[in-house]
Image (cartoon, rainbow, N blue to C red):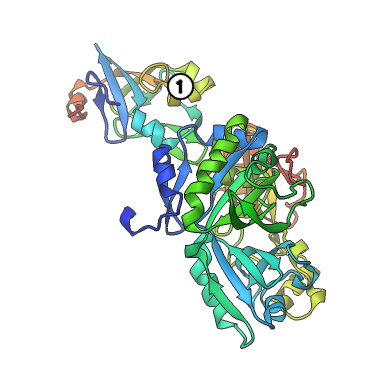
Amino acid sequence: MILDELKYTKEHEWVLIEDDIATVGITDFAQGELGDIVFVEFPAVGDSVTANEPFGTIEAVKAVAELFAPLSGTVEETNSAAADDAGIINADPYGKGWMIRIKMSDPAELDSLLTPD
Amino acid sequence: MVDVSSLKKTPFHRRHLAAGAKMVPFAGYHMPVQYPAGIIAEHLAVRKSVGVFDLSHMGEFEVRGPGALAWLQRMTTNDVSVLEDYKIQYSILCYDHGGIVDDLLVYKLPDRYFLVVNGANIKKDFDWLYAHLTKDVTLTDISDETGLLAIQGPHAQQVMAQLTDYDLDGMGYYWCAKAEICGRRMLFSRTGYTGEDGFEIYCAPHDADELWERTLQAGASSSMALVGLGARDSLRLEMKYALYGNDIDQTTNPIEAGLGWVVKPDKGEFIGRDPIVRMKTEKPGRRLVCFEMQQQAIPRKGYKLMKDGVEAGVVTSGIHSPSLEQGIGLAYVRQGHDRVGTELSLDVRGRQLACEIVKPPFYKHGTHR
């Protein structure tokens, strides 16, 4: 499943841009590859993140994966529901399973994101 | 990337594809690591009800001839002479220095012994055994002609009873039989690697379709799950069953791995006997222990266990336990820090997270008998 209105990274994350806020999650492909996700570790609200640098981790039953920031900026919000019950990332990766919202500091970085085609 | 076309396929391969399994290369085979239900659901199905596993990647050897018993006594650590017909024994093949070639099951049949070895070790084991063969023994690798289906869980007998008329009530754990299953003569045993009651059925590849269909029909009323290698690993780990390549290998000795109970030095000479007996007397410098996380973390192979800032051990297997809902692992821990109740910390990418050494098994409600 690939949604057209989203942008993507090579790390199988999706990005939804609304004004200067980027909402970030992992793709359906990524959750399927990871298998059952047990918990996630997110940065704190207000932390700064840098494009292509790790900002958190996903621990699945069989594997651990790093999350990479698609864009630079500051963390506006993290998904506490996903932190409490990481299974919703498997169940609804593009919806309830979103991860963090980043307030973008460099909109030029948007050019490096991938479009569905 | 592994070229899938170079991998062997088990006789149940097309069933896994049809069921939507996630397939991976394992032991040279294209194997299901999980089905769409996922590892946790598959694991819990085996604990609560029943699950079916394709284990056809495992290796099977036949040992025949007048010298078979004496030869197996020399090759394995356990005492083969105590086996009655149709009894099964867990055992180990060791190198001269006491390191482990493989762990295996030895089935005693009236006219032969039947060995079941790890899929990843088939060639290595066969070469090792063949190199030590005596004139009065024949060794045959029948792995490619042998499919293996396991039915595991508290409801396993209800499923098995629909496949055979054999008296299952009278069949104990670690016994086998040749019986009519789905109308064909097959070898099956009351064995498993999950901690639950269960059966393992050895079939000819041309009987595999019939066996699969009949087993799934029989399991439908118990909501039987298809179970992949992922849940096989989490199930065995909750029982502290060792996995070759993780917890035991050529660099580990049965004593430090906690497998002294299958080493019988009194039976006479066998390969690896002297170094193993020495380690038993001198006490090993490290031991394979079970530990549970007290903080949210999942131990992984290779992570370090620390005591007061100093390395105390290395994780060999780790997972999120679906039954206990916490991180659990096995680790070799240095003498002095290896007692049950010892508090250690797990180094997770530079963070120190609390854990404690616990008594095996992790999961204490298994239905195996």
Which chain contains the residue that carries disc 1? A
Q: Is residue B43 left or right of residue A26?
A: right
Q: Residues within 10 Å of mark 1 (few under 14, many from 20)?
A: some
Q: What residue appears at the point 76 percent right and 45 percent down from the top-left corner? A: B359
- In the image, residue B133 lies at what x, y percent? 60, 83
- In the image, residue B279 lies at what x, y percent? 74, 70
Q: How many marks?
A: 1
- SS class of the residue under badge 1? loop
Q: Is residue B20 left or right of residue B290?
A: left
Looking at the image, which is closer to me, B302 or B155? B155
Q: Residue furthest bottom?
A: B135
| Residue B12 in sight | yes
Q: Residue furthest right?
A: B266
**Is residue A81 depicted above or below B299 in this figure?**
above
Looking at the image, which is closer to me, A105 or A18? A18
Q: Residue furthest front?
A: B183
Looking at the image, which is closer to me, A80 or B351? A80
Q: Is residue B112 left or right of residue B141?
A: right
- In the image, residue B261 lies at what x, y percent? 77, 62
Residue that badge 1 annotates:
A44
| Residue B309 in sight | no
Can you tell which quarter of the image residue B84 is in? Answer: bottom right
Q: What residue appears at the point 60 percent right and 63 percent down from the top-left corner? A: B116
- In the image, residue A79 lies at what x, y percent? 44, 17
Residue type at tag 1: Ala
